[in-house]
């Protein structure tokens, strides 16, 4: 599809722009020719992006530690709109400046690196220099609140999204259409390929299942769905409403062809009482398998035939001046595991905090407290703490990745520069996860999961 889209873009752009060639326009100074094709192309926007990312993980005791520094750069071009049409494309390259232990299995457990390796190409561990990929390549049309996009594009929904917390984000290839009005928005999308963080290749949707480490099935053995799932693509539908009195509603429907469906709804309400901005929210999801969950052999299916999961979340919060607090909760029932390919994005529950997910689990209880302080328009900080209860690590039917129950602590600082260095953004993120019962946790379920620190310093410069 990308090859045909490229021909379409290269064909439509000159045709659309050259159609005006030779047309004579007049102004107060007399007669002159309309802008040339080259002049129209030069009127587009060129964006440069430089990024560096240091990440380090310290595990408990003799378990192996990791750290690495990656740098990269990219360029994108986005044409001016012509009768509502626009084309865009971008690419990015990544270099590894140095690393420590990334490609060495832990001597005690045999486990491999989890976080830092996704800065690079996890499918070719020896590749540290030739990390480049064409990302965006699309043709779009927009007029009167309607938009259609064909090709490789960014996507941001509560589950299918960029999850840009490494060097490169997820990009999806397909077709999306949306319609906006003053309060309502609706969209429909279909995607057949994806490239994800930690890779340089494009994958068909069915090939994307299992690119990341894939945990255990309900029988307690290694999941066998990698390379064995049959699916033609991902469908996404959405209806959203933003009211004039602080209310917001969104409904999302996800269809992984031949594998599963998921429905998600979220309602939020903001109001001002006595100088306080109060916020309350509810969210919930329901998921079930389609047909045989991707493969008639249960050991090769992504989700078990008949498996389903449900979850509910809530939050209450307040904002006073530069201070914002929220109390958040999530409950996932014990009906089955909540499953959504990590290759496609990161879930955004109210209770979510960086460097861990709830995906892969059922029977979850989580509560988190978040505090955000906005120093000024350029700088803001975040502190977060949560308590997460998982099923036992040996409960294969409800704990896919064997993650123990834990306490989760996060601190981040985000600073945007202006003046001479306008466009430079610096972010520092520190994460600690502590097992609730550390003496009962085997090291193979501890390493890179709990009883660990994770440090991040990210710099982005866009101009």
Image (cartoon, grey):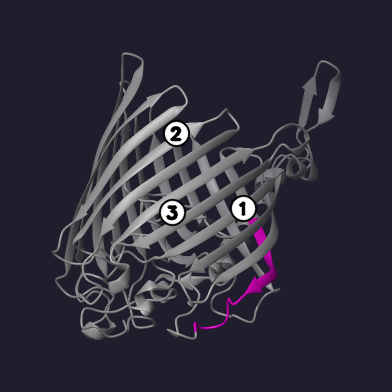
Instruction: Name the spot of residue 369 as percent of width and height, x first.
Output: 33, 42
Lower sequence index among marks 3 and 2: 2
- Specify whether 9 is left or right of 437: right
Give the quarter of the figure containing the C terminus. Answer: top right
Report the residue that reaches farthest toward the top. 274
Secondary structure of the residue carrying numbered label 3: loop
* Nearer mark to the viewer, of 1 and 2: 1
Q: Can residue 361 be seen in this view?
A: yes
Which residue is the site of mark 3?
A: 354
Which residue is the site of mark 1?
A: 458
Q: Which mark is residue 145?
A: 2
Lower sequence index among marks 1 and 2: 2
Secondary structure of the residue carrying numbered label 2: loop
Q: Can residue 1 be seen in this view?
A: no
Q: Which residue is drawn at the image coordinates 65% and 50% (left, top)?
A: 459
Disc 1 and disc 2: Cα gap in Å?
35 Å
């Amino acid at each position: 599809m990308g090859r045909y889209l490229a021909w379409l873009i290269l064909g439509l752009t000159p045709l659309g722009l050259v159609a005006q060639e030779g047309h004579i326009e007049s102004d107060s100074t007399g007669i002159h020719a309309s802008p040339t094709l080259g002049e129209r192309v030069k009127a587009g926007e060129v964006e440069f992006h430089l990024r560096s990312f240091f990440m380090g993980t310290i595990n408990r005791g003799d378990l192996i530690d990791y750290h690495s520094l990656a740098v990269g750069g990219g360029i994108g071009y986005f044409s001016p709109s012509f009768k509502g049409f626009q084309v865009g494309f971008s690419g990015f390259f990544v270099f590894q400046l140095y690393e420590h232990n990334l490609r060495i299995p832990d001597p005690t457990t045999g486990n491999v690196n989890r976080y830092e390796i996704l800065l690079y190409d996890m499918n070719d561990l020896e590749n540290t220099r030739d990390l480049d990929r064409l990302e965006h390549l699309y043709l779009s049309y927009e007029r009167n609140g309607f938009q259609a996009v064909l090709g490789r594009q960014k996507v941001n929904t509560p589950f299918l999204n960029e999850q840009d917390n490494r060097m490169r984000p997820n990009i999806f290839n397909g077709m999306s259409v949306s319609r906006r009005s003053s309060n309502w928005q609706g969209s429909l999308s279909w995607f057949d390929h994806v490239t994800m963080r930690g890779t340089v290749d494009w994958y068909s949707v069915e090939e994307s299942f299992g690119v990341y480490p894939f945990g255990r099935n309900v029988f307690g053995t290694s999941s066998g769905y990698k390379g064995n799932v049959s699916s033609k693509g991902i469908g996404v539908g959405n209806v959203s409403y933003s009211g004039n009195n602080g209310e917001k509603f969104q409904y999302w429907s996800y269809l992984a062809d031949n594998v599963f469906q998921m429905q998600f709804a979220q309602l939020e309400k903001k109001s001002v009482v006595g100088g306080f901005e109060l916020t309350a929210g509810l969210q919930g999801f329901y998921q079930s398998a389609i047909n045989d969950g991707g493969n008639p052999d249960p050991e090769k299916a992504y989700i078990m035939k008949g498996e389903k999961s449900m979850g509910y979340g809530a939050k209450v919060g307040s904002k006073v001046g530069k201070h914002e607090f929220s109390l958040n909760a999530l409950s996932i029932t014990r009906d089955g595991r909540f499953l959504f390919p990590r290759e496609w994005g990161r879930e955004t529950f109210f209770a979510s905090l960086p460097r861990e997910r709830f995906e892969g689990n059922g029977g979850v209880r989580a509560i988190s407290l978040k505090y955000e302080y906005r120093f000024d328009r350029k700088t803001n900080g975040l502190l977060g703490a949560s308590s997460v209860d998982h099923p036992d690590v040996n409960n294969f039917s409800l704990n896919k990745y064997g993650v123990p129950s834990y306490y989760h602590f996060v601190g981040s600082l985000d600073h945007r520069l202006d003046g001479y260095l306008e466009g430079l953004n610096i972010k520092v993120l520190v994460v600690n996860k502590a097992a609730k019962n550390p003496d009962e946790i085997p090291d193979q379920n501890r390493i890179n999961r709990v009883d660990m620190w994770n440090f991040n310093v990210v710099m982005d410069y866009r101009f």
